[in-house]
Amino acid sequence: MFWVVLGVKRPFTKHGGGNSTNPPKNPKKTGRLPFMARFILEGSTDPFLRVDLTQGDMIHAESGAMASMSSTLELKGKARGGMLSGLMRKALSGESFFMQEISAEQGPGTVRLAPSVPGEVRVIDMSNACWFVGDGGFLACDDEITLETSRQKLAGALLGGTGGLFILKATGTGSLAVSAFGAITEVELNGQDELIVDNGHVVAWQDTLNYTPSLSTKNSGGMLSKIGGSMKSGEGVVMRFSGQGRVLVSSRSRPSFVSWLVPQLPSRK
C-alpha cells in the first residue's frame, strides 16, 4: 500500500493547561491532554469547531475551514504531502491541494472552523490510536497527530462515489475533528457481524476494522451480475466492514445530493 506523509510531528513541548479565552457556559467539550489545544463544539445544528490554543500550540485544518480567529494567531497554507504528491492527489481525487496550518506563536488565541457542507462535526479523542477518514471528512487535528494518505483498493478507486484514489490516515494522540453532510451516527462492531455502508455515507472508521469496497450488497454473484444489480438498485460502491471497532456514518450523501441537484439547475444557453 502506498503512503504519503502529510504532516510531520513537531518536538514535544509541554505548555501547561488553562484556556486562552473564557469558554461559553455550556460548551460541548472534549477530553484532551493538558499540553494540547482545546477542541470545543459551539452550536447544536451546523456547529462551529472552536479551538483554543495556548502559546506554542499548532493545529492543522482543511483548506478554507477558518471562519474567524484571534489576531495573535498565524495562518499559513501548506501543500499536503509536498508539491508532487499534492498535485497527484488533486488531479486524481479532487481533494484540496492545500491545508491550513494555524499556530499560536505570538500568544494564546481562539480560532473557529467551519466545514464546507452543512452537517454535524464530531471530535474523536485519540490516544495512540489510528483512524481512517473518507474523502471530505477531515476538518482539523492537533499537531501531535500524523496525517498520511493511502491509495484505495482498485474497486473503490475506480468506481467509488467518494474517496477517489486516496483516503486519509490519522495516527497518534490528540483531537481529530471530522465533519459530514447531515448527521453522524456511530456504529460499533463486536467482531461477529459485518456492516455494509454506502460509500457516500462513510465518514471515518478505526483501523482495527477490516474494510473492503464492493459493487453489491450481496455476497454472491459475478462482476457483471453485481454491476447490473448496482445499476438497478441505484446503489454505487458499498464498504463492507468486519472485526471490532467503530464506524462513523452520515445521514446524507454528497454524491447523491449532487446527482439530484444538477438536473434542477437551469441550463446554459
Image (cartoon, helix red, strand yellow):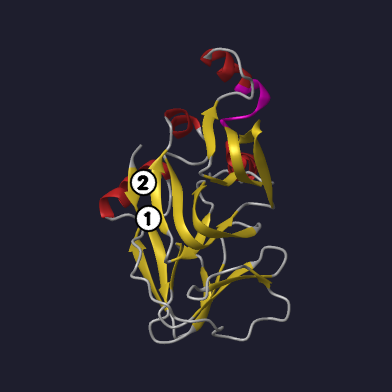
Label 1 crowd bin: few (<14), some (14–19), many (20+), radius 10 Å: many
The kind of residue tagged 1 is Phe
Residue at left offset 61%, top offset 44%: 247
Drawn side of residue 154 relative to residue 217, left or right:
left
Figure check: 239 above or below 62: above
* Pick the front one: 208 or 204: 208
Q: Which residue carries the number 1 mark?
A: 97
Drawn side of residue 219 relative to residue 126, left or right:
right
Does the rendering let one see residue 161? no
- Disc on the earlier residue, 1 or 2: 2
In the image, residue 24 lies at what x, y percent?
68, 81
Figure check: 234 above or below 128: above
Figure check: 144 above or below 215: below
Label 1 to label 2: alpha-carbon separation: 8 Å
In the image, residue 98 lies at what x, y percent?
38, 59
Mark 1 secondary-structure assignment = loop
The stretch in magenta equals 230-239
The kind of residue tagged 2 is Arg
Label 2 crowd bin: few (<14), some (14–19), many (20+), radius 10 Å: many
Drawn side of residue 120 relative to residue 146, left or right:
right
Query: Looking at the rendering, in which quadrant would you find the N terminus?
Result: top left
Q: Report the number of discs.
A: 2
